[in-house]
C-alpha cells in the first residue's frame, strides 16, 4: 500500500477545521476522528478505515449503530458504524493469512477536502491500495450520502468485491422487517453458501442471519415499528445487499460486541460481492453510491 500523507489532529485542524461544524480530535489510543455538527445534525468519522461511526439527523435517534464495546485502536477494525470493505468480501478467496473483508478498513486514509453546501458537510478521502486508487465522499446532512469510487491503476484488467458494511440502530432486530429484497435470490452463509430462491416477502429475522442477496434493486428499507420509523437505503451501482446479525451466541463470542448488544443492530450493507463482483479494465473506474434517509414509514 502506498504511504498516504497522514496528518495528526492538530494539522487537520489547521487545514480543514470549520469552527463548530467540523472539529478534529485524537482519541486516547491515538486515532484521529472528525466530528461534524450542523443545524442539529451530528456525525462522526475516524480516519482509520474512513470509518463513519455516527450519524443522527436533527431530532432523530441515532441511525448508525456502533458497539458500546468497540475498540478504537490502531490496526483494529471498529465494531459497528460503516466499515469500508475492499477488495474482497469475507475471507480472502485463496490466502487464509489475509485479513477478513480486505485491507482498507484498518488503513489510514488521507483527508483531501472538507466543504459545506446546502446538502450538508462533505468530507473527501483517498487511499491507494496496490493496483487501485480509491476516493470516498461522505456527506453528513439530513441524508447520509456515501460514494466510493474505485479506479484500476494496474496494467491489466482486475476484479474486486466491495461493501459499505452499514450497521443500523434498531429498536429490536426481531421486530424489524427489511423490504426491497423480496424478489432476490441469496447466498446463505450460515448454511455453507447455499444459493436460496427469493422469499417473496419482506425479511424478518429470528435466528443468526448472514446473507448475500444478489442483483438487488436500488432501494431497500428497514421498517422499525418499535421506534416508529423507516430507514431507507437508496443505492446506485450496488448489485448486492448483505444482511447480517450474529444472534446472541456468536455475538457473545465477539469481545467487541457482546451478548447484550446484538438486539439493537442490523447490518444491511451496500455492496458488490460474490457473483456481483466488479470487473474493471486498466484505467477503468466504478462508483458505488448509497443515500440513507429516515422517515416515519
Ligand atoms: C458480514 C459477513 O458482512 O460481516 C459475516 O457476511 C461476518 O460473515 C460479518 O461475520 C462481520 O465480520 P467481521 O470481520 O467484522 O467480524
Image (spheres, rainbow, N blue to C red):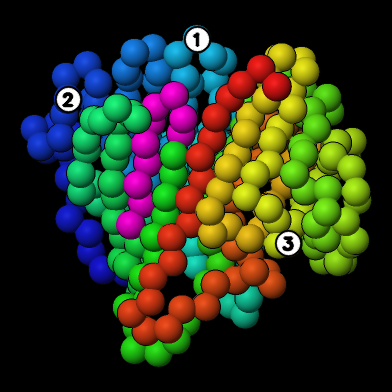
Residue 165 in the image, given as x and y percentages of width and height: 57, 47
Q: What residue appears at the point 64 percent right and 69 percent down from the top-left corner?
A: 276
Q: Is residue 46 magenta?
A: no
Q: Is residue 70 above or below residue 150?
A: above
Circle 2/circle 3 CB separation < 8 Å: no
The range drawn in magenta is 135-144
- In the image: residue 293, left or right of residue 133: right
Instruction: Please state, as top left, top right, bottom left or bottom right, where the N terminus lies in the image.
Output: bottom left
Q: Earlier in the sequence, mark 3 or mark 1?
A: 1
Q: Main secondary structure of the magenta part?
A: strand
- Give the residue at mark 3: 214
**Residue at label 2?**
18
Where residue 224 sits: x, y (%)?
74, 23
Residue 258 makes an appearance in the image: no
Q: Position of residue 274 (x, y in %)?
A: 68, 69
Find residue 279 and name its label.
none
Q: Quadrant of the C terminus?
A: top right
At mark 1, the secondary structure is loop
Relative depth, front residue between 54 and 231: 231
Amino acid at each position: 500500500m502506498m504511504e498516504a500523507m497522514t496528518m495528526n489532529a492538530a494539522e487537520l485542524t489547521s487545514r480543514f477545521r470549520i469552527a463548530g461544524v467540523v472539529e478534529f480530535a485524537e482519541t486516547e489510543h491515538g486515532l484521529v476522528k472528525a466530528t461534524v455538527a450542523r443545524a442539529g445534525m451530528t456525525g462522526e468519522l475516524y480516519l482509520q478505515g474512513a470509518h463513519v461511526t455516527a450519524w443522527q439527523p436533527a431530532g432523530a435517534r441515532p441511525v448508525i449503530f456502533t458497539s458500546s464495546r468497540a475498540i478504537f485502536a490502531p490496526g483494529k477494525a471498529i465494531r459497528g458504524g460503516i466499515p469500508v470493505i475492499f477488495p474482497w468480501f469475507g475471507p480472502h478467496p485463496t490466502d487464509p493469512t489475509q485479513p477478513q473483508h480486505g485491507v482498507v478498513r484498518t488503513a489510514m486514509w488521507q483527508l483531501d477536502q472538507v466543504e459545506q453546501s446546502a446538502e450538508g458537510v462533505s468530507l473527501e478521502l483517498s487511499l491507494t491500495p496496490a493496483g487501485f486508487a480509491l476516493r470516498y465522499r461522505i456527506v453528513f446532512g439530513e441524508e447520509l450520502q456515501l460514494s466510493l469510487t474505485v479506479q484500476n491503476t494496474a496494467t491489466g484488467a482486475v476484479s474486486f468485491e466491495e461493501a459499505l458494511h452499514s450497521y443500523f440502530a434498531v429498536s429490536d432486530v426481531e421486530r424489524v422487517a427489511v423490504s426491497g429484497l423480496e424478489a432476490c435470490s441469496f447466498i446463505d452463509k450460515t448454511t455453507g453458501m447455499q444459493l436460496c430462491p427469493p422469499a417473496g416477502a419482506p425479511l424478518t429475522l429470528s435466528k443468526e442471519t448472514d446473507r448475500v442477496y444478489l442483483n438487488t434493486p436500488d432501494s431497500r428499507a428497514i421498517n422499525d415499528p418499535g421506534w416508529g420509523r423507516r430507514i431507507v437505503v437508496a443505492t446506485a451501482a450496488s448489485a448486492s445487499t448483505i444482511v447480517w446479525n450474529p444472534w446472541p451466541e456468536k455475538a457473545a463470542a465477539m469481545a467487541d460486541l457482546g451478548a447484550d448488544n446484538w438486539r439493537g443492530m442490523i447490518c444491511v450493507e451496500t455492496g458488490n460481492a460474490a457473483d456481483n463482483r466488479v470487473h474493471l479494465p486498466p484505467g477503468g473506474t466504478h462508483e458505488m453510491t448509497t443515500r440513507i434517509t429516515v422517515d416515519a414509514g
